[in-house]
Amino acid sequence: VEELNNGGRFDFNTDFVIKTAFVVFDKRAKYEFEKLRDTTFLEKLETRFPDLETAVTCLRDWLDSKAMIRTGRFLPSQLALIPIIDYLLLNKKYKYGPADGSESQAIRQYLYMAFFTNLLAYGADSVLDQIHDILITASKQQPGVFPIQQLGEYMVRRRKLDAYQFRNDYLGNLGLVLNIISNGVSELPKKRGWSLENDHIFPKAELGR
C-alpha cells in the first residue's frame, strides 16, 4: 500500500488490495469476512501475491507514464483499476505492464470511459464480477488482447447509453478532462494563471454590459 501511494500522491488502502485479490483470484468482489478464512483462497494468495504485487506496481508506473494520472485528485474511482490488474494477471503481463501502442491506448480508453460514464457508481461489486467474466472469456478467445470492444459494449448495456462514444456532457468532469489534455498534472501550481476552477472556463453567468 505504501508503494502504491508513492509518498502520499494517492490514497489506496488495504481494502483495495483485498478486494483486488478477491476479484483476480476468483472469489468474486463482494467483501465477505468468510473469504479470508478460506484455506484455498489463502494458499492461492500466498503463492501468487508476488505476481499481484508486481502487477500493482506496474499499474502505478503505467498510470504515471501512459494514463497521465499522477495524483488521487484525477482518479475518480480506484475500483476501475482492478480490471486492468485482472487483465495483466490473466494474460501473464504482470511483469512489464501494458505494452506501448495499441494495448496501452485501449486500456487508457477503457479507464477514461469508465470514469466518464460512472461505470462503478453503483453495484460496483457486480460490475467487477461481470468484467472479470468478460476478461476470462476474452483471454481464452484472444490471449493477450485487451477486449476494449467487449468492455465498450458492456458499458453501453450497463449504463444504458445510446452508443460507446464520448459525449459533450462528459465535459462536466472538467478536472479529468483538463488533466488529460494537459498531459498529466502532478500538482496544482501555487501561482495565478492556472487552475481547475470550472467557472473560469464554463461561467455560470454571462458578464453584464
Image (cartoon, rainbow, N blue to C red):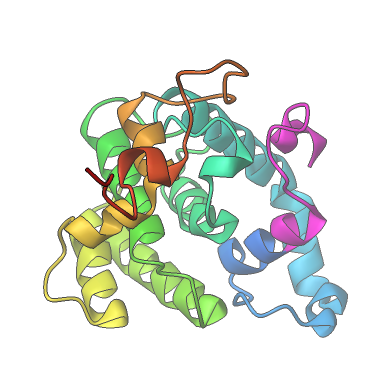
Image coordinates of residue 184 in percent, x first then y, are 44, 26
Quarter the C terminus occupies: top left
Image coordinates of residue 111 in percent, x first then y, are 38, 50
Q: Nearer the viewer, residue 10 or 188?
A: 188
Q: Is residue 14 visible?
A: yes
Q: Residue furthest front?
A: 209
- Image side of residue 89 versus residue 39, left or right: left
Q: Is residue 15 magenta?
A: yes
Q: Residue at x 38, y 66 (%)?
A: 136
Q: Is residue 96 visible?
A: no
Q: Residue at x 52, y 49 (%)?
A: 85
Span highlighted in magenta in the image: 1-18
Q: Is residue 170 magenta?
A: no
Quarter the N terminus occupies: top right
Q: Nearer the viewer, residue 155 or 183?
A: 183
- Image side of residue 88 versus residue 73, left or right: left
Q: Residue at x 77, y 61 (%)?
A: 15
Image coordinates of residue 98 in percent, x first then y, are 39, 34
Q: Residue furthest left?
A: 163
Image coordinates of residue 135 in percent, x first then y, are 37, 63
* For residue 28, above or below residue 9: below
Q: Residue at x 53, y 18 (%)?
A: 192
